Image: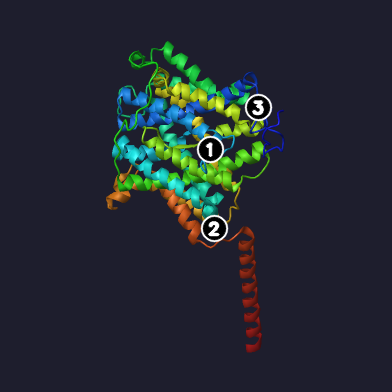
Amino acid sequence: MSEANVSPETGKQAGTRNTSLFDFYSRPRFVKALPIALQHLLAMIAGVITPPIIVAGVVGASPQEQLLLVQIAVLASGVCTLFHLYGVWKFGARLPAIFGVGFAYVPTLIAVGNGFGIEGILGAQLIGGITMMVVGYFIQYIRDLFPPVVAGTVVLVIGLSLYDIAVKYMAGNGNPTAEGFGDLINWAVGGITLVTVLIASQFGKGVIKLSAIIVGIVVGYLISLALGMVDFSNMHDAAWIAVPKVMPFEMEFHGAAIASMVVICVINSVQTIGDLSATSVGGMNRELKTKELTGGLLGNGLTTTVSAFFGALPTSTFSQNVGIVAMTKVISRFVMAITAVFMILAGLSPKFSAVMTTIPYPVLGGATITVFGMITMTGIQLLVKDEMSARNMTIVGLALALALSLGITSAPEAIAQFPEVLQNIIGDAPIVVAAIVAFGLNIVLPNKSLSDEAKEREEIEAAEAEAKTDQTTSSDATR
């Protein structure tokens, strides 16, 4: 190792000759870093391309617009990851974490897109990103307002609300009125994709196990290709290289859309706290520093804000990549940087984006339903970190009940008498309802632990016993 800087993580000299995979500031040999970088790439790519494809379908985007949304999502994910790895001033987590366009926003993006189109999404995203930066600045003062019972409830509802999307994709193209929706051939392809993902994740080893979703997509894609379900028409006109443009879509600002996006951006900040904490504890064997937390939230807010000007959707941490870091203990940012560079190169090629948009919907549905299941289980894991006292069960139960009953489209008449703004906020976004209810109840309800509740029961029993004793004494005296 050279006489250069000293790594604050390991206390070792961190010059250009430090080739350790387990030092954040090291620079391993490219050949040694490449396989792990590809693991991260395979783990995140499906999560990056699917949200823009879903949103494009919701807003009725043209094939060219769909290509653009996928391309800029891939590019933005690479740039965002590099930004967080190296940081600028107070912005950036400077942790071995992967950032990019994420699934957590999808239910809210669908709700906003249904009502206000891609223009409404990007306008609301601009405000939501600014809100995230505000949360990042004040996080050290408000962190206690988002305990596991609140964060877990919201993440749980995110997972539950996404199942409908996956099932509709497995049945066809997500539109129940479209021709061929529900055909057995669609279910067969989606089912085979799902089974492949399960086999790869549970019985595979090494790269196969870590990239189970990609394995499932490849198998499903090949079957779809043999069945004539793949449309290559978009690829012919796609350029090999294209630089993104500023403001490819107009921005519109609607109160209901902004309110929904602000809520989900605040909630995503809570998820970011969890992912960054898991990265530092699982991969670096230490607690998350306040500076890293603040930088991560500030940086995520900034990238979300800037992304809106280029048509990229909101960014967040990728939990699946956090799992890879925790499992391998490889924390070299050089490894993550290789992943980011690959994403940037792919994002500069519309031809690559065109290939991604040829993936049939049943394949996407079969592959991503397991991702949605993991999100649901993450919510449950967060909940069990807190005591399931009567107070916390009330918060979770009521938030779930209201979110899954009000935040639906199957019975819009149920909220027809609500103000229009409120209808637009909660009508298609159960995540917003869950967040508001869980956050509000956590503040209002007295904070009682299981021991406090047990003590209350003992006091009630003691009071009843004393009352019976007094009653017996009084009865004897009367006699």
Identity of the residue furthest to the bottom in this view: 478
Q: Position of residue 354 (x, y in %)?
A: 39, 19
- The kind of residue tagged 1 is Gly
Q: Residue at x 33, y 44 (%)?
A: 257
Q: In the displayed structure, does residue 110 sit left or right of residue 82?
A: left
Q: Position of residue 240 (x, y in %)?
A: 39, 16
Q: In the displayed structure, does residue 81 sit left or right of residue 28?
A: left
User: Which of the numbered marks, if any, corresponds to residue 16?
Assistant: 3
Report helix, strand or loop for mark 3: loop
- Label 3 vs label 2, nearer the camera: 3
From the viewer's side, name the closer residue of 3 and 448. Answer: 3
Q: Residue at x 49, y 29 (%)?
A: 78
- Label 3 vs label 1, nearer the camera: 3
- The kind of residue tagged 2 is Arg
Residue placed under numbered mark 2 in the picture = 391
Q: Is residue 463 shown above or below 421?
A: below
From this viewpoint, is residue 52 visible?
A: yes
Residue placed under numbered mark 1 in the picture = 87
- The kind of residue tagged 3 is Thr
Identity of the residue furthest to the top in this view: 226
From the viewer's side, name the closer residue of 61 and 362. Answer: 61
Q: Is residue 238 shown above or below 332?
A: above
Mark 3 or mark 2: name the one nearer the start of the chain.
3
Q: Label 1 near label 2: C-beta < 8 Å? A: no
